[in-house]
Amino acid sequence: MRWGEIIRRLVLIPPTLVGVAVIVFVLLRVVPGDPIAMMIPPGATPADIDRLRALYGLDQPVLWQFVTWLGQALSGDFGRSISVHQSVFELVLARLPATLELAALAATIAVVLGTIAALVGIQLRGRRTEWLVDGGVGVFLAIPDFLWALILLLLFGVLLPWLPISGRIDPHIDVSFHSNFYLLESLLTGRLDVAGALLHHMILPALALALPFAALVARILKASLAEAEDQDYAQIARARGFSRPDILLREVFPNALIPTVALGGVQITLLLGGTVLVERIFSYEGIGNMAIDAVINRDFPLIQGLVLTFAVLFIGLNLVVDLVVTLLDPRLRHG
Amino acid sequence: MADLALNRSVAPPSRWVAGLKRGGARLWIGAALVGVLVLVALLAPWIAPHDPIEQDLMSAQLPPAWINGGDPAYLLGTDSLGRCVLSRLIYSARTAVVVALIAASLAAAIGIALGLVAGSFGGWVDQLTSRLIDVWMAFPPVLLSIVLAAVIGAGLTSVIAAIVVVDWTRFARVVRAETMVQLQRDYAAAARVIGLSRGGILRLEILPNLVPLVVTLLAVEMGIAILVEVILSFVGISVAGDTATWGGMIAEGRQIVYQAPWIMALPILCIISSVIGFNLLGDGLRLVLDPVQRR
Amino acid sequence: MTTILAIRDLHVAIGHHADATNVLRGASLEVGAGEVRGLVGESGAGKSMLGRAVLGLLPANAIVAAGSIHFEGRDLVAMPESERRNLLGRRIALIPQDPMTSLNPVKRVGAQISNLLRRHLGLSKRDALGRAAELLVEVAIREPRRVLELYPHEISGGMRQRVLIAMAFACDPSLVIADEPTTALDVTVQRQVLQLVERLRQRHGAAILFVTHDLGVVAKICRTMTVLHAGRVLEEGETVDVLAKPRHPYTRALLAATPRADRPAEALRPVPPALIEGLWAEARRLDGQLAMAAS
């Protein structure tokens, strides 16, 4: 393994996160928009307002605020949400599993659909019908996740009212979960009816997130398969009497997987980023939805906590993708 | 039996015609879609049947004219405040085009400038810029634009600022990579030998080679700008008040999607066709302008 | 002596109708059991096409316009795909040209060899690996068990070529097509490889069609030879005879053009362009005659 490379990446994480934090911090405070103004109850006196401001440390110089925040953050205290009056850490932790489950489901669907589309496309290579696959993939790629969310909502929530369009689960279903990983827990404990109900609510948002990514995977994988199929070793396999499907699956696919994961994996963060809007559109209770509310309410501590959470997830995901690529390509392991 | 391959001297078609042919169906369909969009935007005051902000509360939530209960005066129906959907769609196209043009051009300008600087100076300048781009890209783009727009306040300026701030990195990365590659090419070395200054090389040699790349990115970026505007409208922080935007119509439509689905559906169709149009145009232009990248 | 491979009057063209180019013009060739025949010609002469035609690996837009290829009495061109696939790799094998790109980079050497053995000989995984180790010993690779576990990029180019040779002889083929196997190697390694090929041939009793442009190689290892130009056979016979008393002017020119180690100071004598012109003119005339006969 390229240990040096991995260590370097890990070492770069804290400074990057600090950089992210700084930018958000500065943005929020330097530009107009006062959270205190948004939450003062009627009849508040100027003394009350000042006290609120002091409570959240907003009367101090920006640098002091940042250092304090950083110090507290390093010990796990991300402050209190101004709009919800709970610890930011707890708020984020409560909703994070919902988003992670949604993203994981979406990623799985995307990979499966994308791979199938790529394999179909490569079988049709050179034939007239190939452009159907290419064109279809292009259209799916052009429509972003939130548009898909709206389309799916219209199609399968309204015009053909097969599926629910809001929430994580029907309110009248009794849920006594230990963790907030509802889907995981219900699957592990064998409560398949509950899992079914959960999936009912998750399938549309997951599909919305998955479709553009699936199209991306399909495009990259198909191109990689085509390129790999033209390589000498694949041609020679033909000369040794192997059939084309056999060669595609056994010789070519493992090779094509490498650039696909490398190029496509980079984009998987888009899936995560997409949860912000898609969750909103489907009123799904994850951190994406919460983020929008936080911004509208100018809830600084919550915004900071959420942005940092997303940044950690993004960076972590990129690292995982790179590790996977190293695992897939033996040439990278010894170089 | 195979026929003999004779040397036939066929007159080569002019370079432009050959180029346009390379663009293929993508170029034409893309250009058509974008053309329609731009035309609608330009001619909005003349082709819209009603004033987009004129309310007629007596005729609220009317379905499109061909559906039972519709009114031929309002071809595509009305929204909750009795405003003509068709007129609002048309004026939204105007907003979309304006935003797309300005935002995409600004993002391109900044991104290209920084990319050129990073790519050609190298060293610590490059390191700094690259780190900046990395940190920037660690933000979820949607969140960043929402934060920005929420903080600056509603209005077209904040929408444009949001798009520019988020997406300049797209141009910067590509231009930086391309600049570094081009600078290593022989012709750049030759230019240096002749004595051209760095700026001269950039201007005369590198820039022209970047044109195909940039043009494609611009087209794609305009599609993205439209989408970001939609997102911001949807979240309620785009242009203020009555101004018609597709995103705003979708946000309103979402609230009454069971009662009046067309209010959400129609803007979606407009957005899809515009975005696909820009994408196809970008693709087609890339095929036309880049002689090497022929498939 | 039984004829293993009989190519008669083979015409292969690439492309359709008016744009078609003929790559093989009535080539005929025979290889008997255990025979080592050299197939000589410059680049573009059609040597690879001939080899590909035998292996059924012509490009998608190529057609066998006329003629036949018989292998051990069976018609290769007319044979159904599935039947041909059982022959390829087993009774007809290929030693490819470039050892750097001819092995799958993400699979271990042992896996690649044993895949082949299992496909054609139906061996179990363990037996196949055992047999693979034996094969590596045959091609003078020490520590075969260790090499089986390695990836191609972990062994040298010369070793990779030996693996490829081992794979060619793995299933005891009666015909091996060696497609310029020494071209990518340096001279010292070339000699070893040739010796290896000869030794394996004797051991497994195969016939070899040795495609090359190097007359020196032909002189060393091929008992018979065929000279190809513009898809036509110009001369053939016992190597000793052809090299000592070439009958066709092209062959003579080729021989004269070959740089000689014992006369290093001599100026190079390229094949006269006029001769080449004449040969191409003949070829085109032939095409014309065939086209007329077809219509």
Image (tube, coloured by chain):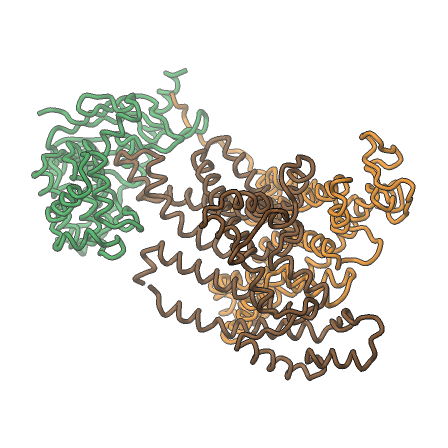
Q: Nearer the viewer, residue B232 or B4?
A: B232
Residue C95 locus on image (x, y percent):
22, 41
Q: Is residue A14 above or below residue A97?
A: below
Q: Is residue A318 above or below residue A134?
A: below
- Which one of the lettered chains is coloured orange? B
Taking the spot 72% from the left edge, 53% from the top edge, the residue there is B234
Q: Which quarter of the rendering shows the C terminus of chain A?
A: bottom left
- Which one of the lettered chains is coloured green? C
| Number of numbered discs | 0
Q: Which quarter of the rendering shows the N terminus of chain A?
A: bottom left
Residue A55 locus on image (x, y percent):
70, 79
The answer to whether residue C253 shows anywhere in this view is: no
Q: Nearer the viewer, residue B224 or C64?
A: B224
Question: Chain A takes which shade in the image?
Answer: brown
Quarter of the view holding residue C6: top left
Residue C241 locus on image (x, y percent):
10, 34
Taking the spot 22% from the left edge, 56% from the top edge, the residue there is C156
Quarter of the view holding residue C66: top left
Quarter of the view holding residue C271: top left
The answer to whether residue A178 shows anywhere in this view is: yes
Residue A279 locus on image (x, y percent):
63, 53
